[in-house]
Image (cartoon, grey):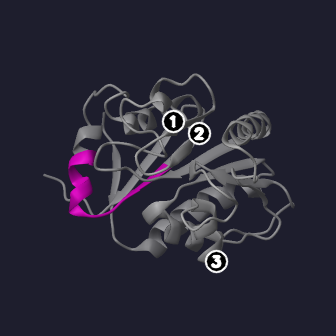
């Protein structure tokens, strides 16, 4: 597969690209669902949030690709880190995962909320990172999340309990942007060119999305 890879380190350029895609769909009056990620993608998503134009209130819905379970606004929460860096979009509907309830109830409520948002969204877009192990969102290789038939999966890891969207959900998107900086990520991008089972490299599921753009400082061989 020929991947669309744009080589750049300019976070402003990448932010412009994502904001333009979202603003384009909003300007057409569409209901847009935007999945945001944690980790190194957070400063990029904060930049994008400042470039979103106001259209009809509630037309843009923002939710997470994955979260670390715990109390609302705990220090390792992706949603907390986004807000703490200034992520804010006037008029947008924000759908965090953490609701201050036990993990089973949180998982069930998140599944129901995403089912509703996915059913009403007319354009679904996501920003994703990729790990050196090939994971994306909270979908680790050979984990329960790879095999899940649900929209959202929760499972334990050595570090924390993860709540993540699944390959099933990712395959429903219209557009995805991958943000992968650093030489340590170059091999992951090389592997995306290959036909590797999703169970071994979950990021492979991103190739099923109709429009996929990878931004990286990756240097072509």
Instruction: Give the extent of the magenta segment.
Output: 177-189
Figure check: 124 above or below 29? above
- The residue positioned 26% from the left and 64% from the top of the image is 182
- Mark 1 or mark 3: whose residue is earlier in sequence: 3
SS at circle 3: loop
What residue did someone put label 2 on?
A: 174
Residue 85 image position (x, y, % from top left): 59, 77
Few, some or many C-alpha atoms within 10 Å of disc 3 (few <14, some 14-19, many ≥20)? Answer: some
| Dot 2 and dot 1 residues touching (CB under 8 Å) | yes
Instruction: Residue 51: tell me if it is visible.
Output: no
Reply yes or no: does residue 55 show up in magenta: no
Q: Which numbered disc covers residue 210? A: 1
Figure check: 111 above or below 33? above
Q: Quadrant of the N terminus?
A: top left
Residue 144 image position (x, y, % from top left): 47, 28
154, 128: nearer the viewer: 154
What residue did someone put label 3 on?
A: 86
Few, some or many C-alpha atoms within 10 Å of disc 1 (few <14, some 14-19, many ≥20)? Answer: few
Few, some or many C-alpha atoms within 10 Å of disc 2 (few <14, some 14-19, many ≥20)? Answer: some
161, 37: nearer the viewer: 161
Which image quadrant for residue 46?
bottom right
- Mark 2 or mark 1: whose residue is earlier in sequence: 2
- The residue positioned 74% from the left and 33% from the top of the image is 115
Mark 2 → mark 1, Cα distance in angstroms: 6 Å
Reply yes or no: does residue 186 show up in magenta: yes
Residue 183 image position (x, y, % from top left): 21, 61
Mark 1 → mark 3, Cα distance in angstroms: 31 Å
Instruction: Residue 178: tell me if it is visible.
Output: yes
């Amino acid at each position: 597969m020929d991947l669309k890879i744009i080589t750049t380190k300019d976070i402003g350029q990448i932010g412009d690209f994502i904001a333009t895609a979202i603003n384009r769909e909003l300007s057409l009056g569409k209901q847009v669902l935007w999945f945001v990620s944690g980790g190194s993608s957070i400063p990029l998503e904060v930049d994008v949030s400042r470039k979103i134009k106001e259209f009809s209130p509630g037309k843009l819905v923002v939710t997470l690709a994955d979260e670390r379970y715990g109390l609302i606004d705990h220090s390792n929460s992706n949603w907390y880190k986004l807000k703490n860096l200034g992520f804010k979009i006037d008029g947008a509907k924000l759908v965090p995962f953490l609701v201050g309830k036990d993990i089973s109830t949180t998982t069930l409520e998140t599944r129901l909320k995403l089912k509703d948002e996915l059913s009403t969204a007319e354009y679904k877009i996501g920003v994703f990172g990729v790990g050196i192990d090939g994971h994306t969102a909270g979908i680790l290789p050979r984990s329960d999340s790879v095999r899940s038939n649900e929209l959202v999966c929760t499972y334990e890891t050595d570090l924390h309990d993860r709540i993540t969207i699944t390959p099933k959900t990712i395959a429903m998107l219209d557009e995805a942007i991958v943000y992968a900086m650093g030489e340590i990520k170059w091999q992951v991008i090389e592997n995306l060119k290959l036909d590797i089972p999703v169970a071994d490299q979950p990021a492979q599921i991103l190739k099923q999305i109709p429009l996929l753009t990878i931004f990286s400082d990756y240097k072509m061989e």
